[in-house]
Amino acid sequence: MTHATGKYTDFEGLPERAVALRRAGLSRRQIRDRLHVDNNDILNRLLEGEPPPAWTKRPNAKDDLRARARELRLQGWTYDRIQVELGCSKSSISLWVRDLPKPERRDPTEQAKLAARKRWEHELAVRDEERQRTKETAAREVGKLSARDLFMAGVALYWAEGSKDKPWDRRENVLFVNSDPGVIRLYSAWLDLLGIEAERRRYRVMIHATADVAGAEHYWAEVVGVDAAALQRTTIKKHNPKTVRKNVGENYRGCLVIRVSQGAELYRRIEGWWHGMVSGITSSVSSGKV
């Protein structure tokens, strides 16, 4: 065979040699230099059908996107969803996944339900953000409590949550039970303000038998700043199988009972403070005028 340049005297043997070099992992430039083939058209004919070795391929920035697009397509995602997720064009997505099976078309009713659920999830997220902002703003409005603030809050808190004397059951005990650690901390700070010594405070956990009793004991001991061994014997509540309890899970720690020993005099003062607060309500306060 002859050609325009007349340069390649052994053209019949060149294809076999070129293919062998290609399969040995040589690049086009290396093959060209080895065989002294300077004409690109001839080199293309010699290497036709032979893929380049992996090491000669330049890394493509879209390789990861392509792999992810194929993965999502196999999961049944549409072009629109993949485009939103990856931020690439539909034409690229179509090119990357055209050999994959098309996802099954959803029933229009199912699609409507899915769209409605996504809108509702978005709405819930927006509401949750607004709710959190409102709480944070309100917390900043309170600021640091003065001694009188804490005193008044403690009286109201005890009268709402603490044990109260009854005409038919005169006990006059200072007994407080709650499951909210924030409430317990405020109540403890109130006792500190009143000068109630730590030695007069008795702590006891109340919790269902199915819960983590030991974990709850250590949790409440840490909240009030005492050793778990200083707690009185825990009261275990038996579960009624007919009752569906919602206070379950790892965050359920029961309630903490705080009793002030020799508390009759303190109880009488608390009751007096409360009645004083009620009788001290003025018309300007009740009408919202400060």
Image: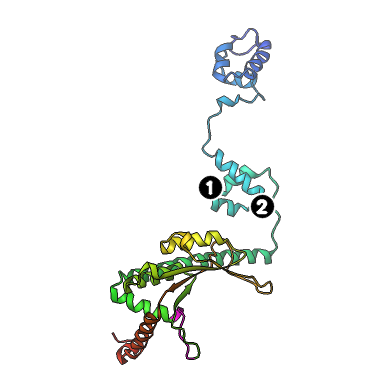
**Residue 138 x, y percent position in the rendering:** 37, 71
User: How busy is the neighbourhood of tag 2: few (under 14 within 10 Å), some, or many (20 plus)?
Assistant: some
Q: Nearer the viewer, residue 12 or 63?
A: 63
Choose top left, top right, bottom left or bottom right for residue 193: bottom left
Q: Nearer the viewer, residue 26 or 39?
A: 26
Q: Mark 1 vs mark 2: give the one in front.
A: 2
Q: Disc 1 marks which residue?
A: 88
Q: In the image, is 213 to the left or to the right of 263?
A: right
Q: In the image, is 246 to the left or to the right of 145?
A: right
Between the residue at mark 1 and the residue at mark 2, the CA separation in whole angstroms equals 18 Å
Q: Earlier in the sequence, mark 1 or mark 2?
A: 2
Locate the C terminus by quadrant.
bottom left
Residue interval drawn in magenta = 160-167
Q: Nearer the viewer, residue 272 or 249?
A: 272
Q: Secondary structure at mark 1?
A: loop
Q: In the image, is 185 to the left or to the right of 61?
A: left
In the image, what residue occupies the spot 49% across and 59% down?
Answer: 218
Let me know if residue 166 is in the magenta part: yes
> Does residue 268 appear anywhere in the picture?
yes
Q: In the image, is 197 to the left or to the right of 220?
A: left
Let me know if residue 192 is in the magenta part: no
Mark on residue 76?
Answer: 2
In the image, what residue occupies the spot 63% across and 70% down?
Answer: 238
Q: Secondary structure at mark 2?
A: loop
* Looking at the image, residue 190 lies above or below residue 82: below
| Identity, as a three-letter code, of the amino acid under mark 1 | Cys
* Looking at the image, residue 159 lies above or below residue 34: below
**Residue 26 x, y percent position in the rendering:** 59, 18
Magenta stretch, main secondary structure class: loop
